[in-house]
Each structure stands twice: as structure tokens, then as C-alpha cells.
């Protein structure tokens, strides 16, 4: 299931906040995951999220980049073949999860 990648406006701003080298790594990983963005329990690359730190993120997935210390949270829209990037954030005390919950509520 190869998907088209779409970024929310906030996620675009998140990505632009990184220097060029980590930005390139993040884009490369997102492109790779877009080839099969389903959750791992369905044979894909994404780690399914549920309730994280009091934030209901059911239906969203994450991918982690250990070296630059970044989490990418996205939703795979199966019917439209879209991988919608919601948050690209540093891995810091659940900050990425709180952002995802807030941004999800806005949509």
C-alpha cells in the first residue's frame, strides 16, 4: 500500500524548524514509510498509538528517528491512499503526543 504524503501546515512548519541534515533524514524516512504506512500489527512500518499521557491518539501511528531524536506522528487514510503527517517533533517528555492531540482536535 504505497501512499501519497501530505503535511498539515503545522507539520510543514515543524519540518522547516530543523537544520538541513536532519530535515533530509526525516524526509527520507517519511518517504520510506509511505511505501507501507500501516501499523506494524498489520504488516506496515508505523507504531500504533493509543492513549499516551492522557491523550487519545487512537488511529494515529508514529515513527522514531533515534539519532536526531525525532518523532513523526501521522495518520494513514486508507480510503484515499494518503499518509497525513500531523507532527514532527523532538522526543521530549511526551511533547509530540500533546501536540498531536491538540492538532487532531483542530481538524
Image (cartoon, rainbow, N blue to C red):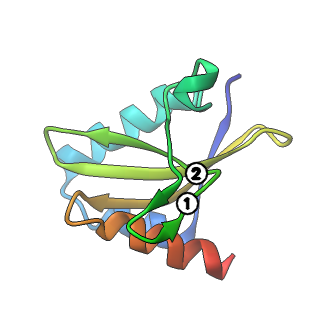
Name the one closer to the observer, 98 or 28: 98
Picture coordinates of residue 53 (x, y %)? 38, 67
Within-10-Å neighbours for mark 2: few <14, some 14–19, many 20+: many
Left or right of 15? Residue 31 is right
- Residue behind mark 1: 57
Please give the label number shown on residue 72: none
Picture coordinates of residue 61 (x, y %)? 52, 45
Q: Residue at x 57, y 32 (%)?
A: 39
Contact, CB < 8 Å: mark 2 with mark 1? yes
Please give the label number shown on residue 60: 2
Picture coordinates of residue 29 (x, y %)? 38, 33
Name the one closer to the observer, 78 or 56: 56
Q: Is residue 10 above or below residue 87?
A: below
Q: Residue at x 27, y 37 (%)?
A: 25
Residue sticking out furthest to the left? 67
Name the one closer to the observer, 49 or 65: 49
Q: Residue at x 52, y 72 (%)?
A: 101
SS at badge 2 = loop
Name the one closer to the observer, 34 or 24: 34
SS at badge 1 = loop
Picture coordinates of residue 93 (x, y %)? 21, 66
Q: Residue at x 18, y 38 (%)?
A: 66
Amino acid at each position: 500500500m504505497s501512499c501519497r504524503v501530505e503535511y498539515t501546515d503545522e507539520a510543514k512548519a515543524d519540518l522547516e524548524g530543523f537544520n538541513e541534515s536532519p530535515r533530509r533524514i526525516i524526509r527520507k524516512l517519511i518517504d520510506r514509510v509511505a511505501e507501507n504506512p500501516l501499523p506494524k500489527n498489520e504488516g506496515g512500518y508505523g507504531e500504533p498509538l493509543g492513549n499516551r499521557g492522557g491523550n487519545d491518539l487512537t488511529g494515529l501511528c508514529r515513527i522514531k528517528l533515534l539519532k536526531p531524536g525525532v518523532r513523526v506522528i501521522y495518520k494513514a487514510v486508507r480510503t484515499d491512499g494518503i499518509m497525513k503527517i500531523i507532527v514532527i517533533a523532538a522526543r521530549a517528555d511526551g511533547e509530540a503526543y500533546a501536540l498531536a492531540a491538540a492538532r487532531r482536535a483542530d481538524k
